[in-house]
Image (tube, helix red, strand yellow):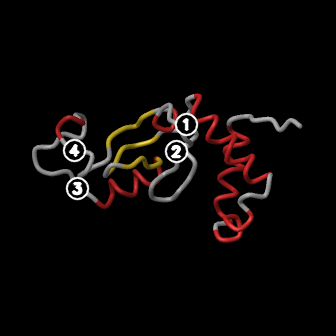
Amino acid sequence: MNAYLFRAALICEDCCVKAKKEICLSEGCDPENESSWDSDDYPKGPYSDGGGEADCPQHCDHCQIFLENPLTADGYDYVINAIVELIDGALTDWRNENAGNTSALESWFRFYNLKVTQ
């Protein structure tokens, strides 16, 4: 999935389209030349693979959709540890307060094709 850089955050394509409709480029800015504007003022991108390899799964800063980025070795450790904590019940209270986050863990588990072994 493509990601865009906007106001120091990654956003998805749908949110980028919405942001571009709400914002006009300043005079002198060329939409075909990203070096003519700052990402604080107008989205830049697209950047493939959810913004690229990172130490954790990336989500759109506006709508929270998972951007399906590749992970570093530390990133895989992060995801595996989060899932193990959930399975072990260490996040029981956390799950009840933030039920939406368990769906993020499920998305990561499926996307990164992780396997549970005993």
Asked if the residue at tag 1 contacts the one at tag 2, i.e. Cβ–Cβ closer than 8 Å, the answer is yes
Q: Residue at x 24, y 40 (%)?
A: 31
Query: Spatial distance from mark 3 to mark 4, Cα to Cα?
Result: 13 Å
Relative horizontal placement of residue 28, taking residue 5 as reference (left or right): left
Q: CA distance from mark 2 to mark 4?
A: 22 Å
Question: Which residue corresponds to mark 2?
Answer: 58
Q: Could you give the CA–CA distance between mark 2 and mark 1, rounded to whole angstroms?
A: 6 Å
Amino acid type, callout 1: Asn
Q: Read off the residue under disc 3.
A: 24
Residue type highlighted by circle 4: Asp
Height in image: 62 above or below 82? below
33 relative to 56 in the view: left or right: left
Q: Amino acid at mark 2?
A: Gln
Quadrant of the image for the C terminus? Answer: top right
Q: Residue at x 65, y 42 (%)?
A: 79
Earlier in the chain: of badge 2 and badge 4, it is 4
Lower sequence index among marks 3 and 1: 3
As rendered, which of 115 and 2 lies closer to the eye?
A: 115
